[in-house]
Amino acid sequence: MSCNSSCILLMAIVIALSALAMLTYSQIGICVGIGPDDYGYEFPVMQINGINSTITYYNISTTSQIPSVQQNVCLSINDSPIFVQNVLWYYGEDFHPGWGISIFYDGSYHIVSTELEMTGNTYVLTMVWQNNGSGVVIDFCLSNITWKDDISKYVPGVYGGVVGTNSGTVVVGYGNGSTAYFAPGFNVSISSEIKVNDKWYVPPAIFSGFPNTGESAVYGRAYLAPRNTVFVVYNNTRNMLYEPQILALPSLIISGNKVLVFPFNSLWVIKYPNGTSSIFVNQTEYVEGAEVYPYGNFSLPYDNLLPNVTQFKLQKLYHVVSEVRIYGSNNFWVPQEEYVFTLINGSYEPILINGSTSKNITTTTSSTSTLTSSTNASILTLTVTKTITETVTQTKTIVLPDETFITLHEVTTVVTTVIQSDYFKKFYELVAAVVIAEVIILLIFRKKDGKNT
């Protein structure tokens, strides 16, 4: 092996290690890659029959063509996936918006596009679909609160429900597979509801960055704010990394004799020990041993990395005392391991409540962990007590930044100090050993070359 070839190989290994260091795990334990994303208000596939989204444009600074806001869902008709889109193009508060609908079936896109004589910076996109026996009627609507326009389309065939992976409303490229490049100042908000049994509710879980369309965007970040609003803003701290965000998960606490649930205004079911059940929104009476779960059958992405939060059995397992109010309470119980979401500097931040303290429970034990994100910080302290044979107390101090700009707007406690998994650690160790071996070989050849000269 020559000196030049050894140097080339060594350089290639170093470059490969640098690339792998970027492709580690995100803070929610989801493997990330390099490439564009989408940003907005997404939710699990559920058997719903409508989506209603309010979009407010504060700033659409881009270094590319203007973005589109797309409301996307995939319906099964005649056992075939039918991709349905309701699309808005915003050019400015004093300009008429562009509006388009698209339905993909029979191997082609059926598109209607128009420009409406309405203005403003807030618009409402609505899609409602209904099975009429011989096919599916899809009603599209665009409104600026004052004026609205409607388009209705009919797709013949047997309706099989909502399919795919995720549905929702996202900010992406203008069209035809394009990418939007957000610039400093970009800021668009989206608030969505889903239609279940002819009533509108907040979805049981909220995501961003799980692609559901051919267009995409980069240099963005999403966070969940009060009043069921997701803000999509410029953020280049992660450069071109693709990283899905989980903004809200089903969550439940017990405060006094009340069961309080999150996200607010989502639809839940309580099944009592005697077998009867009822539905509720936001809160219900506590009944020991009852089962509580979000309405509808759905699965969460990467659920193997998350606690089971699609079903809860009511019991007072973990006692939590919090310095800030969580779902309106400072002192409450949690029935099992889960995330609770607390409002910090304008966005909902997840905190994992579990019993991960010392396994030796013969005496009261405690542990403290700190996550530092900024020197200017507000401190949130939780005291969590697990009720078992003996008492185990865990105190968590989580330091979060004061800035209202995007920082920790995703589930941050699935993976904390450990960035890469054991698999990647072993892989790095193996590659490091190869690098060392190559360096030794390089030195040996250099020594031999020196003797030969």
Image (spheres, rainbow, N blue to C red):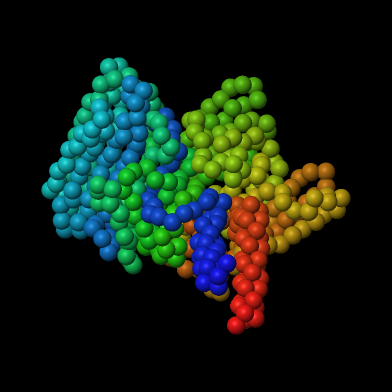
Give percent across and percent down for residue 302: 54, 43
How many discs mark residues in the rendered view?
0
Q: Residue at x 25, y 34 (%)?
A: 103
Residue located at (28% from left, 48% from top): 177
Compared to 292, does 122 lie above or below?
below
Residue at x 77% of width, y 58% of height: 366
Q: Nearer the viewer, residue 56 or 233?
A: 233
In this orientation, does residue 210 appear? yes
Residue 196 found in image quarter = top left
Q: Quadrant of the N terminus?
A: bottom right
Report if residue 225 is visible in the image. Answer: no
Residue 12 coordinates in the image, percent (x, y) = 51, 65
Q: Quadrant of the C terminus?
A: bottom right
Vertical placement of 292 versus 274: above or below? Answer: below
Residue displayed at 72% across by 56% down: 394
Residue 277, percent from left and from top? 56, 25
Of all residues, the one furthest to the top in this rendering is: 133
Q: Position of residue 180 (x, y in %)?
A: 30, 56
Left or right: 71 in relation to 3: left
Front residue of 323/83: it is 83
Please indicate whether residue 144 sits to the left or right of residue 359 in the image.
left
For this view, does 71 lie left or right of residue 390?
A: left
Residue that extends furthest to the front in the rendered view of this protein = 452
Quarter of the figure with residue 265: top left
